[in-house]
């Protein structure tokens, strides 16, 4: 058994297995360019003195049974702004939609580079099982790879807005 075995979540889904690790966060500071004494700067020193630390991670998974769909895995994504945390359980298909949004942004001429994010997504896809796999070992590795992908998006993006949108919506808009 695992913590959460047989418990129901807030949506009434039966949680069959739960694993989480809160030690896998990536931290960054997001600040617009700032002016100090008339000089524009975006240096880490200025960010350190005036910014808020923001962290993001995929730090767990659970296996869920729902009446209207087959047993499936969900992954816990946590985004923290200082002392405020946002979290959501996301299915793999939502990460795939996030990857599609990132790919479209990368192809846009006026967008920052998401090259590291796309490389991390390729790594996720390389290790993807052909069929639904609910092995704890497989899901643990998948959690690690999804964390690398989300961390890359976190560092590639000019702001945490994309990941916040990912967390706060039920489905990513393509």
Image (spheres, grey):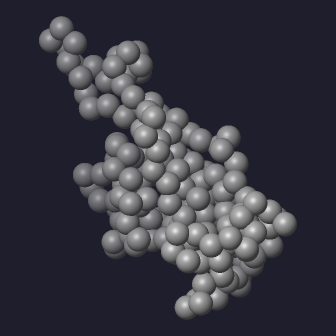
Q: Is residue 106 above or below residue 129?
A: above
Residue at 56% across, 39% down: 26
Q: Which is nearer the eye, 84 or 155?
A: 84
If the image is split into quadrants, where does the N terminus sit?
Answer: bottom right
Rendered location of residue 19, percent (x, y):
73, 59
In this picture, residue 51 sits left or right of residue 18 = left
Q: Which is nearer the eye, 98 or 54?
A: 54
Residue 123: tell me if it is visible: no
- Residue lying at the far top in this picture: please name it: 37
Residue 80: tell me if it is visible: yes
- Residue lying at the far bottom in this picture: please name it: 68
Residue at 20% across, 18% down: 35
If the image is split into quadrants, where does the C terminus sit?
Answer: bottom left
Q: Quadrant of residue 75?
A: bottom right
Rendered location of residue 30, percent (x, y):
37, 34
Q: Is residue 17 above or below residue 56?
A: below
- Residue lying at the far left in this picture: please name it: 38
Q: Quadrant of residue 16?
A: bottom right
- Residue lying at the far right in this picture: please name it: 1
In this picture, residue 171 sits left or right of residue 63 = left
Rendered location of residue 161, percent (x, y):
34, 50
Residue at 71% across, 84% down: 131
Rendered location of residue 163, percent (x, y):
41, 54
Q: Which is nearer the eye, 130 or 53?
A: 53
Number of numbered markers:
0
Residue at 22% across, 12% down: 36
Q: Is residue 114 above or below residue 101?
A: above
């Amino acid at each position: 058994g695992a913590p959460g075995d047989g418990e129901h979540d807030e949506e009434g889904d039966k949680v069959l297995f739960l694993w989480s690790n809160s030690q896998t966060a990536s931290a960054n500071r997001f600040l617009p360019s700032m002016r100090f004494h008339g000089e524009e700067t975006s240096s880490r020193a200025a960010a350190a003195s005036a910014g808020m630390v923001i962290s993001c991670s995929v730090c767990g998974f659970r296996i869920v049974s729902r009446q209207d769909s087959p047993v499936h895995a969900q992954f816990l994504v946590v985004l923290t702004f200082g002392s405020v945390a946002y979290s959501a359980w996301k299915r793999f298909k939502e990460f795939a939609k996030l990857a599609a949004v990132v790919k479209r942004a990368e192809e846009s001429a006026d967008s920052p580079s998401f090259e590291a994010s796309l490389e991390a997504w390729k790594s996720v896809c390389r290790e993807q099982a052909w069929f639904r796999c609910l092995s704890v070992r497989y899901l643990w590795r998948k959690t690690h790879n999804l964390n690398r992908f989300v961390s890359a998006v976190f560092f590639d993006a000019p702001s945490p807005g994309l990941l916040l949108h990912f967390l706060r919506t039920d489905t990513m808009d393509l």
